[in-house]
Amino acid sequence: MFGHIDKPLIMGILNVTPDSFSDGGQYSDVDAAVRQARRMLDEGADIIDIGGESTRPGSEPVAADAQIQRVVPVIAAIRRQVSADIPISIDTTLSAVARAALEAGADIINDISAGRDDEAILALAAETDAPIILMHSQGTPKTMQDNPYYDDVVQDVLAALYQQIDAALKAGIKKKRIAIDPGIGFGKRKQDNLDLLAHLDAFVAAGYPVLLGTSRKRFMGTICDVSEPSELVIATAVTTALGIMAGVQMFRVHDVRENRQAADVAWAIKQSRQSL
């Protein structure tokens, strides 16, 4: 996983939490989570991303034991009942959670702290040869929207990601196992998010697969005058199409069907343009 990605990948979000900003409590039951995983696969998901801790703005951290109790039964059930092959990523910043998830059948580590919260997660990725997604965030979920500031958001975020890429490589993680995420909405103002989206090609140029996570995020609601996250499906699909044209390879979304369509059409257009 990672290295060269031939076509855009859709990562379906499966939050097994009581308090995530958009779908908290909907899939905390194992049976409900399995049904949602099956639905996302039917709608075209390439990866299922499972998380046991809400990282919405203002959220409190969740202990490793609690996260493990939430995610491990779901991962095991998906492996038994849905697919033995679909890549599963574990959305956590804690090495203990990542290790338990990998042992239960997960394949990828998706760390919103990029190894800053728990450096042992980098050693774990190296030890297991698990692909890891390094995301940029400023502060913690509890504090990240308390007056975030950048001199130049694109260059500042890139510099921070390069620093964590260097830490990952020094920990022994292979370059082909690393992907990056600019962290839309994580310690960013509305204009910061827009600037990052306008310059996604700068992240693609870094030479690592890029994951984009804009799904149902609040800054788009302020543009569209929408307060309910579930009403931002079209807005999210627009950013997916724009990301395709900029060279982004992976998209983390709640609404798989709509974003699969957006990605496939944008990809076909991009391929046609490149063939001329």
Image (cartoon, helix red, strand yellow):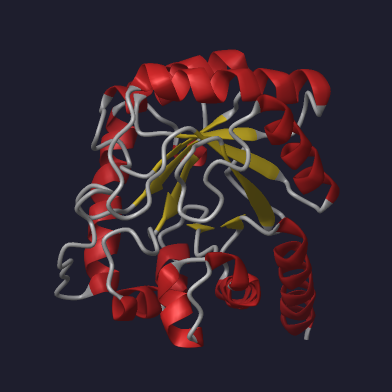
User: In this rendering, is residue 248 above or below 245?
Assistant: above
Residue 223: quadrant of the picture: bottom left
Look at 28% across and 67% down and name the residue there.
Answer: 188
Q: How many labels does the image show?
A: 0
Name the residue: 43% across, 55% down.
181
Please provide percent x and percent y for residue 184: 40, 64
- Left or right, 152 with respect to 61, comes to left
Q: In the rendered image, which quarter contains the C terminus?
A: bottom right
Q: Whole-percent x and y of residue 224?
A: 51, 85
* Residue 128 appears in the picture as rendered: no
The spot of residue 65 in percent (x, y) is 39, 16
Q: Is residue 51 left or right of residue 140?
A: right
Residue name at image x 78 percent, y 23 percent: 84
- Foreground residue, 248 or 40? 40
Residue with the most extreme right position: 42
Above or below, 158 against 68 in this view is: below
Rendered-image quadrant of the N terminus = top right
In this view of the protein, which residue sits in the foreground, 137 or 225?
Answer: 225
Residue 264 relative to residue 113: left or right:
right
**Whether residue 30 can be seen here:** yes
Depth check, front residue: 137 or 2: 137
57 lies above or below 65: below
In the rendered image, residue 172, in percent from the top left (x then y), is placed at 36, 26
Q: Which residue is drawn at 65% across and 76% down?
A: 234
